[in-house]
Amino acid sequence: MYKALIKPILFLLAPEKAHYLTIFLLKFTLAIPIVGGLFRAWYKVEDPRLERKLFGLTFPNPVGLAAGFDKEGKYYRAMSSLGFGFIEVGTVTPKGQDGNPQPRLFRLPQDNALINRMGFNNEGMDALTQRLKQSRPKNLIIGGNIGKNKVTPNEQATDDYVKCFEQLFPLVDYFVVNVSSPNTPNLRALQDKEPLTQLLSTLQSLNQQKSQPKPILLKIAPDLTNSQLDDIIDIVRDTKIDGVIATNTTISRADLNTSEAQIQSIGNGGLSGQPVKQRSTEVIRYLNTKSKGELTIIGVGGISSPEDAIEKIEAGAALIQVYTGLVYEGPSLIKRINKALLLQNTQV
């Protein structure tokens, strides 16, 4: 029904308006108890064979919602009814910020892709904290994706990550350090070995002082070279963080079906969806091979079918996340992936 009826209507609207309308209507509809029950019965696939035990956490299934979909923590309860095994909120920054001027989200239908330059638009960690204090659905695992404010210079970036880490610590199950968005000026410079080691070491030191430390993962860009990926493996080992999310959006515009003129008119931003699928899988496979399977990886990038998800898992991903595929395929994608994993009896 989504692809035949709902998607054509949504694609008549500007992408950002369509996004907020969709999740508002979903939240409103699921507030009706009988409807919420029907959604959960239809979309959830519950089977102990889908469970994944990682970082001391039990994930009901390996399919998660990637960061960026629910930046504010306003919709995680509604989205949990669609069968996700875990949901990542954010990216959140210490202070609220508007992000980049609109329009800042663009569809590339010929490529089943999106380009975004949202710029970490969010209401800040205080607002997110209040929402996360509300009751959550049973067994729902929530990750907190943290970043720095645009006005914070890189030399002081660690302070921003520490503030978010400390405030969200009691409320999320794991953390993701986002230094790979292309939409905050100079943010990706924090992926260099020295500043990244310093940042992760600081967070891990604070983490280990807690009575029950939380898993910390690093989200990386698909545009890193193999030499840089080698550095990532070394950094993860040295800082003893729990894993990597591979990958964020790409700044590449190679091999697109969309016309060059349209790409030029859109301008800067991170590209997600099908065009990043191959590179994301390459990064996962490289990290898994070079680390001899020791590195825990969450795979994301271009997953729009069960086959795409299985490809990521076979490349070395322990869990996977979707976002752009959800826009193009609809909520049945989660169910289809979980059904396929059961059918294939794929072990992560």
Image (tube, rainbow, N blue to C red):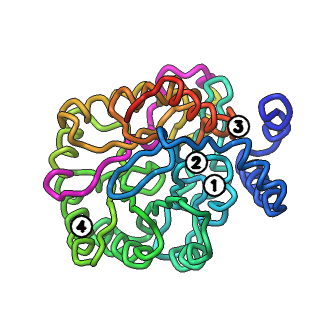
Residue at 69 percent across and 58 percent down: it is: 78
Q: Residues within 10 Å of mark 3 (few under 14, many from 20)?
A: some
Q: Earlier in the sequence, mark 2 or mark 3?
A: 2
As drawn, 59 above or below 167: above
Residue position for label 1: 80
Separation (CA) of disc 4 from disc 2: 28 Å
Label 3–label 1 contact, CB within 8 A = no
Separation (CA) of disc 4 from disc 3: 37 Å
Q: Earlier in the sequence, mark 3 or mark 1?
A: 1
- The residue segment tinted magenta is 236-260
Q: Nearer the viewer, mark 4 or mark 2?
A: 2
Q: Earlier in the sequence, mark 4 or mark 2?
A: 2
Residue position for label 3: 330
Separation (CA) of disc 2 from disc 1: 6 Å
Residue at 44 percent across and 70 percent down: it is: 151
Using the image as rendered, state which of residue 100 and residue 228 is in the foreground.
228
Separation (CA) of disc 3 from disc 1: 14 Å
Q: Quadrant of residue 124?
A: bottom right
Label 2–label 1 contact, CB within 8 A = yes
Separation (CA) of disc 2 from disc 3: 13 Å
Label 4–label 3 contact, CB within 8 A = no
Please tell me how many numbered marks the rendered image carries: 4
Tell me the kind of residue under disc 1. Answer: Ser
Left or right position of 11 against 190: right
Disc 4 secondary structure class: helix
Q: Quadrant of the N terminus?
A: top right
Q: Earlier in the sequence, mark 1 or mark 4?
A: 1
Residue position for label 4: 204
